[in-house]
Image: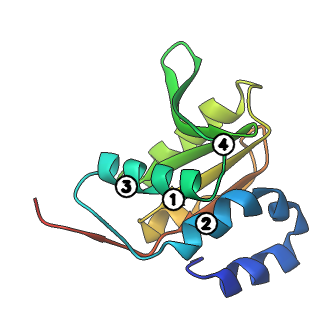
């Protein structure tokens, strides 16, 4: 599970292509831990972190009929997940990646099981980051 800058540096040593995601990964990792009640709360927190780091970001971007990804920045799609099965998340990433509208995908998740999703087979390079986050009671 990727939880720190050090971990991210280790991952990029093994897969140097992931450095293209560093402009997104570093601010998100630096702002940890997150506290949220709903996934929408986490969206707002992450959007604020990225904007504070001067990362251009668009929220709720349509990729086609019925396909709306959480964020897009510099052609990279960002999906945030706090629940759901790994199979459903994998299918969703595949739908996004095969639109040919993104150059890469980054999954930000609070679910350890989502980190077991393969990084290949989505039509574009894909990486996942496990967020350090606490879900607050409603």
Mark 1 and mark 2 in contact (Cβ < 8 Å)?
yes
Crowding near the residue tagged with mark 1, few <14, some 14–19, many ≥20 C-alpha atoms within 10 Å: some
Reading the chain from its start, which is encountered first: label 3 or label 1?
3
Mark 4 and mark 3 in contact (Cβ < 8 Å)?
no
Crowding near the residue tagged with mark 3, few <14, some 14–19, many ≥20 C-alpha atoms within 10 Å: some
Query: In the current view of this chain or complex, which residue is farthest to the top?
Result: 65
Reading the chain from its start, which is encountered first: label 2 or label 4?
2
Res 33 → quadrant: bottom left
* Image quadrant in which the C terminus is located: bottom left
Which sits in the foreground, 117 or 136?
136
Reading the chain from its start, which is encountered first: label 4 or label 1?
1
Instruction: Report, in whole angstroms, how far the alpha carbon at label 3 lies from the one at label 4.
Output: 18 Å
Mark 3 and mark 2 in contact (Cβ < 8 Å)?
no
Crowding near the residue tagged with mark 4, few <14, some 14–19, many ≥20 C-alpha atoms within 10 Å: some
In the image, which disc is placed on residue 56?
A: 4
Instruction: Report, in whole angstroms, how far the alpha carbon at label 3 lies from the one at label 1.
Output: 11 Å
Picture residue at 83% right of the left edge, 57% below the top: 20
Instruction: Report, in whole angstroms, how far the alpha carbon at label 2 lies from the one at label 4.
Output: 12 Å
> What residue is shown with label 1?
49
Picture residue at 48% right of the left edge, 70% below the top: 131
Secondary element type, mark 4: loop
Reading the chain from its start, which is encountered first: label 2 or label 1?
2
Query: Residue 112 placed where, x, y %?
Result: 46, 71
Query: Residue 24 placed where, x, y %?
Result: 67, 57
> What residue is shown with label 3?
42
Secondary element type, mark 1: helix
Q: Is residue 132 left or right of residue 100?
A: left
Query: Residue 44 placed where, x, y %?
Result: 39, 49
């Amino acid at each position: 599970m990727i939880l720190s800058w050090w971990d991210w540096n280790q991952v990029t040593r093994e897969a140097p292509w992931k450095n293209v995601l560093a402009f997104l990964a570093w601010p998100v990792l630096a702002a940890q831990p997150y506290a949220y009640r709903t996934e929408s709360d986490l969206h707002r927190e992450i959007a604020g972190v990225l904007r504070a780091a001067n990362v251009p970001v668009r929220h709720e971007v349509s990729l086609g009929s019925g396909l709306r990804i959480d964020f897009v920045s510099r052609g990279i799609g960002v999906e945030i997940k706090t629940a759901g099965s790994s199979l459903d998340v994998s299918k969703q990433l595949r739908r996004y990646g095969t639109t040919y509208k993104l150059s890469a995908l980054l999954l930000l998740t609070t679910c350890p099981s989502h980190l077991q999703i393969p990084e290949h087979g989505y039509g574009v390079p894909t990486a996942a980051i496990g967020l350090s986050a606490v879900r607050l009671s409603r």
